[in-house]
Image (cartoon, coloured by chain):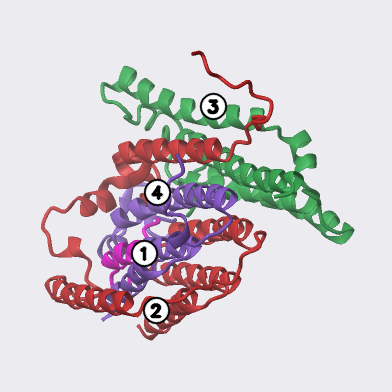
Chain colours: A green, B purple, C red
Amino acid sequence: MKGMTIIVKTISSWVKVLIFIFGIYIILFGHLTPGGGFAGGVILASSYVLLMLAFGGDFVQKDLPLALDSKLDCLGAIMFVMIAILGSVFSGAFLANFLVDKYGAPLELLSAGTIPLSNIAIGLKVGASLFLVIFSLSICHKGAELDGE
Amino acid sequence: MPYALCFLLFVIGLYCAVVKKNMVKIVLGILIMECAVNLFLVMLGYRHDGVAPIIDRAYYDPGTGQIAAGFINNSVDPLPQALVLTSIVIGLGSLALMISICIRIYEKYGTFDITQIRRLRG
Amino acid sequence: MAVFYILLIFIIIASLIAVETTDLLSAVICIGAMGFGVSLMFLFLRAPDIAITQIVVEVLGLIILIRATISRDLTFISGDKEFFATIVSVVIVFMIFLAGLKVFETLPDFGTPIFAEVPKAASQTYIEEGLARTGAANVVSSVILDYRAYDTLGEATVLFTSIIGATVILRRTAKRKTDTLQPASPS
C-alpha cells in the first residue's frame, strides 16, 4: 500500500504524536474526567491508523510489527484478568476493588484503587485490537492488487 | 415525542436491512439500528436541566467528604451511560467482522448482490 | 428542548438518504453524518463520556467502510426491484412502528428518568455512595469498573473474539496449485 504526498507525510508525523499523547491523557484521567479506557484505547488505535494511511503499510510494519501488536493485545487482557483474580485473593470477591482507600485522596490523580489500573489494561487491549483489524483489512486489499483480481 | 422519533430511526434501519439486496446496504442498516438503540437507552436516563454524572470540586467538600445536594438531586442516570459505552465499542468490532465477510464474498463471487450468490458450490 | 428535535430530524434525514441512494460512497458519507449527529445528541443529553467514544468510533468505522466499498469496482447498485415484496415489507414494518408507539405511552415522559419513580433504585445508590465507596469522581467509571465490572470483562471477551474472527477470515493463505496435483485414484 502506497503512502501519500510529502505535505501529508510531514503534517501527519507531527500530529500523530499529539494524538498519541492525548489518548494516554484520556486513559490516565479516566476516573476524574470523562473518557476512560475505551475512548482512550480507540484514540491510540487511530493515531497508528493515521500513520498507516499517510506512510503506507510497509513503514508501519517496521514501527509496530503485527506479532508485537498481538502480544500487546493479549497482555492487556491478561492484566485485566490478573486484577480480577487478585481482587478475589485479597478481598474475597472476584473483581473487588482491593486497593480502595489505600493510597491517595479523592479527586486526585492517584486515587480510586484499582480503577486506573483497569483503565490502562482496557485501553491497551482495545487499542491494539482495533489497529490489528484495520491493518489486516489493508493487507488484504494489497494482496488483491498484487494477485491482479 | 422524542422516543417516537428514535423508534422511527430504528424502523428505518430495519427496513434497510430487510428489503435491500446489496450486502453493504444491509450492513449499513444494521449499523443504523445499533445507533438508534444506543440513543434510546441514553434518552431514558435524561433529566430536565440535569448535570453530567461527574463530581468536581464545586460539588465536593474535602473536609467532611459530603457531596452537595445540588448534584444528588439533579444528576442524570449513570447506569444507561455505562452500558451504552461498552455497546458502542462492541458495535465497532462486529462491523469489522461483517465487512471482512463481505470482502471475502466479493473476492469469491465478484459481486455484492445477494440474489446472485445463492448457489452453494460444493 | 428544541435542539433535540432539530438534531433528531437531521439524523433521520441523513439515514433516509443513506438508505435510498444508489451510490455506495454517498451512503457511507451519510452514515458518517448520522454518527456525528448522534454524538452531538449525546453531548446535549449530558453524557460526555459517550460523546467522545461515539465520535472516535465513528471515524474508525468510516475508514473500515470506505476500505471495503470504494476500492472495489462495483459502486453502483443495479438490478430490478420486486414490487410486491417491497410493498409487503413496508406494510409490515409500518405495523411494527404503530405497535411500538403504543408501548411508549407506558414510559414516563421524556425528562423524568426512571430511577426517580422507583424507590431504592440502584442508580440512586451509585450517585450517593459512589465517591465514598470507590474513590472515583467519575460516577460512570466507577460503575463500569467497580460496581459492574463483570460487564466489562464480558465486553473485553466479545471484542477479543470478534477481532480474532475478523483477522482469521482476512488471512491470506497460500494458493494451492491445482494443476500440479496428482490424480488421486487408489483403485
Q: Which residue is mark 3?
A: A75
Foreground residue, B16 or C142? B16
Q: CA distance from mark 1 to mark 4?
A: 16 Å
Q: Position of residue B82 (x, y in %)?
A: 35, 51
Location of mark 4 (residue): B86
- Could you classify mark 3 by the number of other residues whose Cα lies within 10 Å: few (under 14), some (14-19), or many (20 or more)? some
User: Looking at this view, is C40 or C80 the one in front?
Assistant: C80
**Subunit that carries the residue with mark 3:** A
The CA distance from mark 3 to mark 1 is 33 Å
Q: Is residue B49 magenta?
A: yes
Residue drawn at x 29%, y 77% is C90
Few, some or many residues within 10 Å of mark 2 (<14, 14–19, 20+): some
Pointers 3 and 1 within a single chain:
no
- Rendering coords of residue C8 (x, y %): 39, 79
Residue bearing mark 2: C8
- Position of A4 with respect to C117 (left or right) is right
The kind of residue tagged 2 is Leu
Residue B97 - label: none
**Amino acid residing under circle 4:** Thr
Q: What amino acid type should be assigned to the residue bearing mark 1?
A: Met
Label 1 residue SS? helix
Task: Identify residue type, mark 3.
Answer: Leu
Tell me the magenta residue range. B37-54
Q: Which dot marks residue B33?
A: 1
| Label 1: chain letter | B
